[in-house]
Image: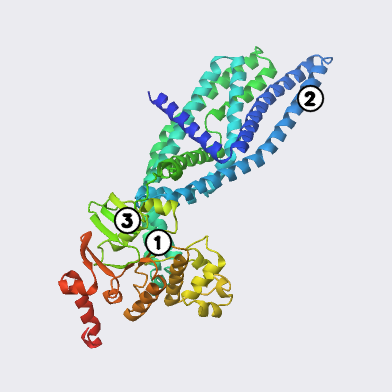
Amino acid sequence: MRPVLAGIDAVRHLSTLAQVLRRHSPRRAAVVVLAAVVSGLLTTATMVAAGWLLGSTTDLISDPGAARPVYLALVWFIALITLSGLTACLLEPLSLAVRQDLVAGALDDVTHVATTIELSSADDPDTAAVLGDAGRTLRDWMVLAGLHSMWGVLAGRVAAVGSMVIVGVWFWLAPLVLVGSWLWLGREFARWSVDIGETAGGESLGLRRADYYRRLLVGTESAKEVRLFGLQQFFADRFHRAWQAAMLGIWARRHDASRSVLIAVAGVAAANAAVLGLLAWQAAAGTTPVGQVAATTMAILGLAAFGVQDDNDLWSRRARAVLVRFDLARRALGPDRAEHLAHSAAVPGPVLALEGVTFAYPGSAEPVLAEFNLHVAAGQTVAIVGRNGSGKSTLMKLVCGLYAPCCGDIRVKGVQATEARNRHPGTVSVVFQDFARFPLSLFDNVRLAFPGACDAEVHAAIDRAGLHELAGRLPYGVQTILSSAYEHGQDLSGGQWQRVALARACLAVIRGAELIILDEPTAALDVDAERDFVRQFLEVTRQCTTLVVTHRLASVRELDRIVLIEHGRVAEDGRHDELMAAGGTYCRMFGLQARRYSQPDAER
């Protein structure tokens, strides 16, 4: 039963591989497959011609007048050798071209999946492992070598089929014994390779942990703390322990799986010794012609292609497995949104409407939001406040369509939030707490908020955010790279980066965004600086519907509404004076913050 199941798996594997080739390199793959088949057939024909030439030469020794068959065999042999060389020359560049197509296509698939799956899926450890391993694996030298050499392996398999015919002509039972032994070895070796691959996959978390420690040790982002606190040895020890712990499982599985491979190797050696011994005995007895002995000997050696050919075979197995694994992951994680994303009809109502929304992160039993309800009318400016961990930032990601709720409904301008993000980009614009600081020009850092914005709109956003003076001091103006890691680049201060974030919001307003979100990008600023920034933000977004997430209540006391989130629900909702009069949680939080900032420094 196991061989049958293995055969079914092999057919599925080849079917998936064929689909990958058809998707990424249909024409070149067809040509390279044809070239590999022709190369294998030419190899078989060359064996026959070599035997014919040797047999004719032997006959010439006993009969000097039989020179014509020798010349004819020699011409055929030279012609076949020449054609084999030309086919190999053609196969080499074609293999490289197909490899480039496959790597580029696979990386495109991984990029598509990574940028289109819901963030809740990306947070799943298994998904993170697949995406994290993808780019590194597709650039691994063994995988690249395998993608290049698998066509030579295919040519070897075709030649092996021809070798089986040649050996069968000599003795029908011999190819059955030899091919069976080589297939046994190939199956055990493939199982060994799969076991090692699965073990490595199972240890992916440990290897990623080790890689994380390595990046902390050598990366630039943590360089100051590593040197200041003398953490070099600390992270080096953590890296070694994590790496060795992950590799111990791989080494143990590799050792255990090697036994069956060694037994199969012994079986192959015994089968070849028996068949070659029989052929040698017949040759010595003169019952088999010299030419047939030569061709059959080469064919017997060629049957090794049914097993494990060489390093190229090992690399090609690995490369094929990688392509199939990532294609299966692509299908599981990245369905075509054009086909699978359901259309939802726009429903008239407020700019933002959340009804019965419940959301929990993968692997978490406790929901962050539970039966959450909120309506925001057009033109309102609403503050979202609450204690740490109350779900404010998660709520903003749901509103942006980055997460899909477990249940409930989220609509922006009457359209589902996830659909608005995918089909109507720009409907919602957000400045997150950890907003991106790209090592690009000032101009591009602003334009990335709306890649389709024209130059005039980007310049207008830069001016509205008060960045024109800074741009005038930069070496190349708005085209200066905002990173000192690049030649003529320049770093910005925290306050200057805040203005870049403000410029992105300005560009969103210019481009007609329906909803603007400010998600605590000023958490590291003092109270006065944050209040000034919020006022500037509200000034440039006064014609839009705006959500402001903050811990500092003094910055939002003048807003239209203040919504307090507690235990995953809206606990309080109203204007500042209304909430203060109610004497609830908001009143107590505001009072605590007010007393803290009104106390002298010595009393804090």
Tell me the mark number nearer the camera, choosing from 3 and 1: 3
Residue furthest out toward the right: 65
- Residue farthest toward the front in the current orientation of the protein: 348
Q: Position of residue 109 (x, y in %)?
A: 49, 46
Q: Which quadrant of the figure has residue 387?
A: bottom left
Q: Is residue 574 above or below residue 283?
A: below
Q: Amino acid at mark 3?
A: Gly
Would you place residue 317 above or below residue 203 in this image? above
The amino acid type, in three-letter code, at marker 2 is Val
For marks 3 and 1, the one nearer the N-term is: 3
- Name the front one of labels 2 and 1: 1
Q: Going from the N terminus, do you reach mark 2 or mark 1 first? A: 2
Q: Between residue 188 and residue 9, name the one nearer to us.
A: 9
Q: CA distance from mark 2 to mark 1?
A: 80 Å
- Which residue is located at x 53 percent, y 71 percent? 459
The quarter of the rendered structure image containing the C terminus is bottom left
Judge the density around disc 1: few (<14), some (14-19), many (≥20) Cα neighbours within 10 Å. Answer: many
**Which label sits on residue 75?**
2
Which corner quadrant of the image does residue 374 belong to? bottom left
Residue 446, image x and y in percent?
Answer: 49, 68
Residue type beneath disc 1: Glu
**Residue sitting at 29 percent across and 75 percent down?**
558
Distance from disc 3 to disc 1, alpha carbons, whole Å, reads 13 Å
- 152 or 426: nearer the viewer: 426
The disc placed on residue 349 is 3
Q: Nearer the viewer, residue 99 or 330?
A: 330
Q: Position of residue 103 (x, y in %)?
A: 55, 46
Which residue is label 1 attached to?
514
Q: Is residue 589 visible?
A: no
Q: Earlier in the sequence, mark 3 or mark 2?
A: 2
- Element marked by disc 3: loop
Residue 323 position (above or below residue 230): above
